[in-house]
């Protein structure tokens, strides 16, 4: 494992976006499931505490242990070297490690994460109308922003198989003026396999793909537009004359999170830490204080079973027992000292909730929201005389401004499983902090404003999903196909308990206009 451990540590620092796409089967399980908190890991029920010098298991203890996946073994080796790791590092490696990562290093032959044979289904795969309405939404924004004749960019983060972008482009082709204004299409994708699937759909299987310092290039079948694939949005140039239209569908839910618990720390006997004390200086106090403790990931004890680990009833026990579990640090970490203090919403938890408060923070979500805002409204680093463009984010999470807690979930073959079982084979996702995205966007650029979030069901119905679906049903000809069309769109707007129309939210980032105009789907009308 000499070479594996350093590679594990390098992979833990990589920041890659997540891809999502849809299934052709309407019976497949949505990524969220029927309950926003189903399949979560309760942070406060199975804690084991670790300090900087204790809690590392004896290396010989796990010498002959059989790990569920190669990635699990790699993670365990890294933890033996460094001690328990932040949940964000665990999530990043599980999803994007080049050795057995869920999206970037699949170890199963001909593996497909999506659809009936995969693990989950998303909205664009349920009905083509979803992507068509996203295309119409971009059209309405282009119309409202003076119909720029050139310089339009279409950007998607986490494009999956490319289905959503394909539906968007096909729809925009019906409006030649906008179609001709598009300069380029950018796809932010980390997975080589998914990049190729996107290229085959959007460009054709015979279309060549070339590589440059920026990323990968090909030519789209629609209007021969250039398509560029990058591994990070930072690789896409920011230019003041460009009008970016950005879509992020089920992307933010898979960005790594840090989790914390607020604890009451009794007064310390010593007023200051000694030179040999491994505790954080902030942990040493002369009066009782409230401090945040980070939740860390460590291996489960050898021989653990679902029963001994008390796997929740909401999670399937048909997988091997979890290889890892959450633990709570006994002293402050660098993340617990900074991240819970990064927003007034987080800081308020000390007074509104007190000891026992739980907190999830996603630094990557803030980075992406800030980037979107800078492209649209400009920033000190990238001045833009006239803000233009728009970003549309569709994902699941609380729409009332509350901070997500206990939302980590694992999904395997359309079932809820422990997020710590079979690393690399289990999809991981969390609830999105929409209020945090809005806060980051408006903080990053004075040239933007945020609308929403609104429930997906409300957004789609205001966009005309019912009317469009009725047209498709009539064109289907066969009664059975017509019923399938109706079943699909109703599933997208279902507002029942756990329904996709209720738990999924839509949020828009637009050029700042003093509240004079609301976008379509958020209470506004089409501007001619």
Image: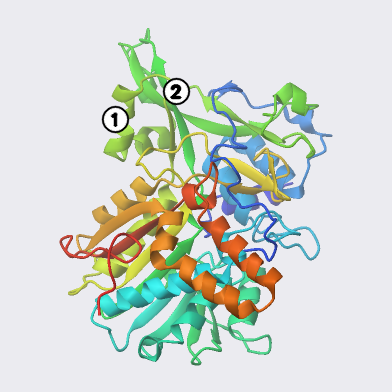
Measured Cα–Cα span from mark 1 to mark 2:
25 Å
Image location (x, y in percent) of residue 180: 39, 91
Residue at the image point whose x is 56% and y is 66% from the top: 124
Whether residue 21 is visible, yes or no, is no
What label does residue 138 carry, if any? none
Where is mark 1, residue-wise? Answer: 348
Residue at the image point whose x is 58% and y is 22% from the top: 47
Residue 133 sits in quarter: bottom left
Frontmost of labels 1 and 2 is 1
The one nearer the camera, 435 or 470, is 470
* Colouring chosen for the image of the structure: rainbow
The one nearer the camera, 73 or 491, is 491
Q: Is residue 29 left or right of residue 403?
A: right
Element at label 1: loop
Image location (x, y in percent) of residue 261: 45, 27
Crowd tier of the residue under label 2, counting other residues whose Cα lies within 10 Å: few below 14, some 14–19, many 20 or above: some
Element at label 2: loop
The one nearer the camera, 4 or 252, is 252
Q: Is residue 424 left or right of residue 274?
A: right
Where is mark 2, residue-wise? Answer: 279
The one nearer the camera, 209 or 462, is 462
Q: Looking at the image, do the residues carrying marks 1 and 2 touch, with CB atoms under 8 Å apart?
A: no
Q: Earlier in the sequence, mark 1 or mark 2?
A: 2
Residue at the image point whose x is 53% and y is 56% from the top: 14
Residue 354 sits in quarter: top left
Quadrant that contains the C terminus = bottom left
Residue 147 sits in quarter: bottom left
Q: Residue furthest top?
A: 269
Image location (x, y in percent) of residue 159: 54, 68
């Amino acid at each position: 494992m000499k070479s594996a451990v350093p590679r594990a540590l390098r992979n833990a620092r990589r920041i890659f976006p997540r891809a999502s796409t849809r299934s052709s089967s309407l019976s497949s399980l949505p990524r969220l499931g029927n309950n926003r908190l189903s399949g979560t890991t309760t942070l406060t029920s199975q804690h084991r505490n670790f300090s900087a010098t204790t809690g590392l298991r004896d290396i010989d203890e796990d010498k002959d242990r059989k790990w569920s996946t190669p990635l699990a073994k790699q993670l365990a080796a890294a933890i033996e070297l460094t001690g328990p790791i932040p949940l964000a590092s665990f999530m990043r490696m599980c999803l994007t490690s080049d050795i057995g990562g869920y999206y970037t290093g699949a170890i199963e032959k001909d593996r497909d994460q999506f659809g009936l044979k995969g693990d989950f289904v998303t909205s664009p795969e349920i009905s083509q109308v979803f992507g068509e309405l996203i295309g119409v939404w971009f059209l309405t924004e282009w119309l409202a922003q003076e119909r720029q004749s050139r310089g339009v960019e279409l950007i998607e983060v986490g494009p999956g198989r490319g289905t959503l972008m394909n539906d968007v482009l096909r729809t925009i082709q019906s409006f030649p003026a906008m179609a001709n204004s598009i300069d380029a299409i950018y796809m932010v994708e980390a997975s080589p396999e998914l990049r190729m699937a996107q290229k085959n759909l959007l460009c054709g299987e015979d279309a060549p793909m070339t590589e440059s310092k920026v990323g990968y290039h090909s030519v789209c079948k629609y209007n021969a537009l250039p398509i560029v694939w990058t591994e990070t949005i930072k690789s896409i140039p920011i230019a003041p004359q460009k009008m970016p239209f950005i879509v992020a569908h089920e992307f933010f839910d898979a960005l790594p999170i840090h989790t914390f618990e607020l604890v009451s720390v009794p007064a310390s006997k010593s007023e200051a830490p000694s030179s040999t004390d491994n505790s954080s200086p902030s942990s040493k106090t002369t009066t009782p204080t409230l401090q945040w403790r980070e939740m860390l990931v460590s291996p489960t004890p050898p021989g653990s079973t679902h029963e001994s680990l008390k796997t929740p009833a909401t999670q399937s026990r048909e997988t091997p027992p979890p290889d890892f579990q959450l633990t709570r640090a006994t002293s402050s970490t660098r993340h617990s000292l900074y991240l819970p203090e990064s927003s007034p919403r987080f800081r308020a938890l000390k007074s509104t909730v007190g000891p026992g408060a739980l907190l999830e923070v996603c630094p990557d979500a803030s980075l992406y929201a800030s980037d979107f805002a800078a492209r649209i409204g400009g920033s000190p680093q990238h001045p833009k005389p006239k803000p233009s463009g728009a970003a549309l984010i569709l994902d699941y999470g609380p729409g009332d401004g509350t901070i997500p807690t206990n939302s980590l979930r694992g999904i395997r073959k359309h079932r809820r499983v422990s997020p710590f079982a079979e690393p690399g084979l289990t999809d991981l996702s969390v609830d999105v902090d929409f209020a945090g995205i809005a806060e980051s966007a408006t903080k990053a650029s004075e040239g933007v404003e945020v609308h929403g979030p609104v429930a997906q069901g409300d957004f789609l119905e205001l966009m005309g999903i019912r009317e469009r679906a009725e047209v498709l049903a009539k064109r289907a000809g066969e009664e059975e196909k017509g019923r399938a069309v109706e079943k699909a769109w109703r599933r997208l707007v279902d507002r029942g308990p756990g329904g996709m129309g209720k738990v999924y939210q839509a949020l828009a980032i637009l050029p700042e206009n003093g509240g004079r105009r609301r976008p379509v789907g958020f209470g506004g009308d089409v501007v001619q």
